[in-house]
Structures are given as structure tokens and as C-alpha cells.
Image (spheres, rainbow, N blue to C red):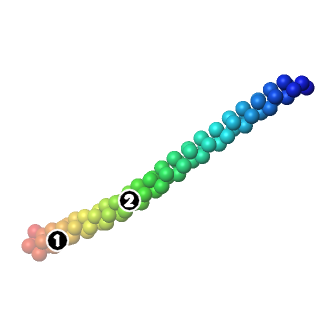
């Protein structure tokens, strides 16, 4: 190999290394973006879970009120005779 060929080979390898480094840096940046988005989504999921819990509690009370109203109406019919 001549000196010129050796230099050309070194340049080609250097370009490949640069390309790989750029890909690694981009991957790291994407990882950071994804990680921050995951944190945001976890907070959103936690809030949603709390809100669903509150709605389930309200739903339970609603069914209790409906059942009480039905029982009250039946008792009223029975007591009045009809």
C-alpha cells in the first residue's frame, strides 16, 4: 500500500467512526426525550387513576341512593296498603 492509500483508508475509517458517534449522540438525545415524556405520562396516569377512583366512589353512592329510594317507595306502598 502506498502512503496515499493508507491515508485514504484512515479517512474512510474516521468518517465511519464519526457517523457512528453522531448516531450514538442522536440515540442519547432521543432517549432523554423519551425519558422525560415517560415521566409526564406517569404523572398523567397517576392523576387519571385518582380521578377514576373518585368517580367509582360517586357511582357507589349513586347506587346506594337509588336502592334506598326504591326500598322507600316499596315500604311506602306496603304501609299505605297500596
Query: Left or right: where does residue 4 sit relative to residue 65?
Result: right
Q: 62 left or right of 25?
A: left
The spot of residue 28 in percent (x, y) is: 60, 46
**Could you tell me if residue 63 is visible in this image?**
no
Q: Earlier in the sequence, mark 2 or mark 1?
A: 2
Percent from the top left, x then y, of residue 71? 20, 70
Q: Quadrant of the N terminus?
A: top right
> 27 or 53, which lies in front?
27
Q: Secondary structure at mark 1?
A: helix
Residue at (22, 67) in percent of width and height: 65
Judge whether 75 appears above or below 43 on screen. below
Q: Locate the C terminus and report the quarter of the image it occupies.
A: bottom left
Q: Nearer the viewer, residue 79 or 55?
A: 55
The mark lying in front, picked from 2 and 1, is: 2
Who's the residue at 44% across and 53% down the image? 40
* Residue that badge 2 annotates: 47
Q: Is residue 32 shown above or below 1?
A: below
Where residue 27 sits in the image (x, y, percent)? 61, 43
Q: In the rendered image, which residue does mark 1 sit on?
A: 72
Q: Residue furthest bottom?
A: 79
In the image, 51: left or right of 62?
Answer: right
* Residue at horizontal 45 percent and vertical 53 percent from the top: 41
Query: How many neighbours does mark 1 have within 10 angstroms: few (below 14), some (14-19), or many (20 or more)?
Result: few
Amino acid at each position: 500500500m502506498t502512503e496515499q492509500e493508507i491515508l485514504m483508508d484512515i479517512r474512510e475509517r474516521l468518517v465511519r467512526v464519526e457517523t457512528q458517534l453522531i448516531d450514538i449522540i442522536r440515540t442519547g438525545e432521543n432517549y432523554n426525550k423519551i425519558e422525560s415524556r415517560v415521566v409526564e405520562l406517569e404523572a398523567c396516569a397517576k392523576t387519571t387513576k385518582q380521578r377514576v377512583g373518585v368517580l367509582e366512589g360517586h357511582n357507589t353512592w349513586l347506587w346506594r341512593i337509588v336502592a334506598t329510594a326504591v326500598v322507600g317507595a316499596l315500604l311506602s306502598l306496603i304501609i299505605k296498603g297500596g
